[in-house]
Amino acid sequence: MTEFSAAVYQNEYLAGGSTDVHAIVTVECRGAGQAGQTSAGDAGEIVIVDTSASMGWPGVRAAQAAAAAALDQVIDGTWFSLIAGTHQARLVFPFDGGPMGMAQMSPQTRSLARQAIGYLAPDGGTAMGTWLELAARVVQSVPSVTQAHAILLTDGKNQHETPAELDQRMARAAGHIQVDCRGVGSSWEVGELRRIAQTLMGSVDLIPRPDQMAAEFATLMRQAMSRGVASADLRVWVPQGAQVLFVRQVAPSVEDLSARRREVNALTGAYPTGSWGDESRDYHVAVRLPASRAVGQEQLAARVQLAVGDQVVTQGLVKALWSDDSSLTARINPEVAHYTGQTELAEAIQDGLAARAAGDDRTATAKLGRAAQLAAETGNEEVTSKLRKVVDIEEPATGKVRLRKNVDKLDEMALDTTSTKTSRVRK
Amino acid sequence: MDDAVSAVDGVVGRECGTCGTVAGPADRFCEHCGADLPTDGRATSSGVAVPADPAPPEGPDTATAPMLAPARRQPPRPPCRECGGAVDSDGYCTQCGAKAPSERDHFAVAPAPGVAAVSDRGLRHHRNEDAAAVLADGAGRAALVVCDGVSTSVSSDVASLAAARAAADVLGTGSVGLAEGSARIAALGVRVTQAAAAAAAAVAAATPDDDAESPPSCTFVAAAVQDPVVVVGVVGDSRAYWLPDVGEPLLLTIDDSVAGQQIAAGRPRAEAEAGPQAHAITRWLGVDSPDQTPRLTPLEVDGPGWLLLCSDGLWNYCSEPAALGEVAAGALGGAGGDPLTAASALVDWANDQGGHDNITVVLARLGGATGATGTTGMASVAGTASAEGTDQR
């Protein structure tokens, strides 16, 4: 039995005249079960591997091993397919030319898919939008699939379609499939892959060496198969006249959900959160109330709910209570402070690296210095250790750093991909 | 009086299902968290059965039978007081998010036509320490009580409610029979004095053993009404006004406060009430009070009008009888003479003035009831419309 719970962390006390309310809402899922087993509808898994010429034979052989490792984790009965990507997309499996672009996993289909994987060869360019578009089409060819997920592997930049074309093709895939993106080596662009992952509600990460791909793919597929809740929406109700300043996922990674809003009713917006396994996610919700109330008055600032289909499965209440006791109103809730810092940290790293790439060392030093300071303050050790490979941190407390010469491109990319991963509040 | 004490003694093991706070046997909501309590009141975890209602009278012993039996029922959740929207089960409005007050924080009752009470937390205080209990038979008899808990004590909200209920129970019991004129005044006066004693006993019973520092305490103003005769009794600074349809409004009580003493000695009201310590009360109900005997004021009305009882949460904004009379006339006029609507309007008005204190208003129509004099025997009041102080409309 799947169970959701919600907890709210906030300082509900507002000084007279204040109208902005911030809260961290932790949503936890337990007993999610396996993908395609507990919810209505089937699960679908797609492995998309880059087979462009730049992969070369060593890269393609590693990709073959990774695809096979991923398929080994797919539970029998799950719909699956395999796509090879170059400047165009090609359905590698199933290859029977039938109306269904996916096959159901069984010992037979697994063995046939392995054979198909063996025929992959390096050739051509890179147009990831076409890969995603085909993946979405393939998913829609099997109406019973209600939970579709893909792993996308690339080694390079998107060179054979324009950014606008990529956007259009991504938009056609959005809502049909969730995509975890992985870049191998150092020739791909973190920003580009991050944009795909954010649009398609997946993760982005770096695989430094080809021989590490198989293990990463197996892990990703195991995770996908453990997400028994096909999809859920975060719903945010605010009072009449109030304004949602933002809705942000802040753990396990920072994702601004504000633009995903879909109206449920005049006072309630739904923000898709994709599929859920046994996990916990934190959301930062900020609301501006229409007016301040008199000291001593209380009101609800937001109902934050998780809905599976039309069913609200858990709810947290964000409150506002006006007080003239400054010892209450001046306190900043530690969870809100922590995640506000983590969000700024992600921005500082990305801005700093962008400035560095553009040759603006002054901005890069300032931004990465601020990042070092925030990482130290919020105890994000993973970021701190990755920052140290890009800058020399002289004083973490004040953010005094010096840019390092001869930084390994992989270290810089690792810092970039880590930037949105947040540390949890130390409780 | 014994009833009142035993009712409070009965606070054993009946717990709020929401927060676990031990509740009194007659409580219909939790004093701590405001959650609704089951209303049958008979089950207790300690196995001691505590009836929620006084046992119904058996046989012709009318002298001790409750004249005005409190009605108990579970009201539906009323709409949002601010915007009229539906209130969600989470306790907040589904439209504007306003917190729906608990029954303790806001309640409104109208036990009979012409009689109503509204009590409200106000805007500044964290809880409502005011209490009201009103009983009426719709035929000219009514028991009206307002108690204002003194907020320096932790459980004054519990004490004030216990006191108001105990006093109303005494006021609603028994009959003055055929007594008229001064005999009726004397009989009602005795009743008010007994009611104050019952209220004091209830406050004492609500006092924790270890609270010698600041025991709970409250004010007391009560009216025993048998139209056209009223006897008002007061301890503290809650007040009673007579607002005749024709003629000058009249303040029936003298505050037991520093200002009240100065006014009684001839100092102008506005000046006295503006002085330092003006609002410090000199008498109250509580185990640390040296004098808990109510000061009685009799009144025999000679025409129709409204009797108004209130806590200082209202009169602080309109102390002079003329000023209060004007505000009340406006509220009554706007309400078309409906006392529940008018009392609510007066509470809203006080909140508009700042709502610095809890606000309680009781209104009763006098001087117009037919058959008010003569033989209002027990038989004629059986099955009368009545309600208890926490009955929310």
Image (cartoon, grey):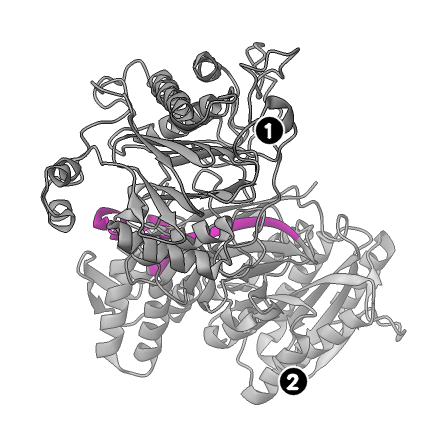
* Image coords of residue A412 (percent x, y): 37, 68
Marks 2 and 1 on same chain: no
Question: Does the magenta run of residues contain A322?
Answer: yes
Q: Considering depth in this image, is B56 or B29 the residue closer to the camera?
A: B56
Numbered disc 2: secondary structure:
loop
Residue A105 percent across, percent down from the top left: 82, 56
Residue on which the image places disc 2: A87
Image side of residue A45 versus residue B52, left or right: right
Is-magenta flag for residue A390? no
Above or below, A71 against B162 in this view is below
State the residue at coordinates (24%, 32%).
B152
Amino acid residing under circle 2: His
CA–CA distance in space, label 2 to label 1: 71 Å
- Residue located 21% across and 32% down the image: B256
- Residue range corresponding to the magenta coloring: A312-340
Query: Can you tell which mark lies on residue B38?
Result: 1
Q: At which x and y percent is residue A203? A: 54, 63
In-front residue for pair A46/A302: A302
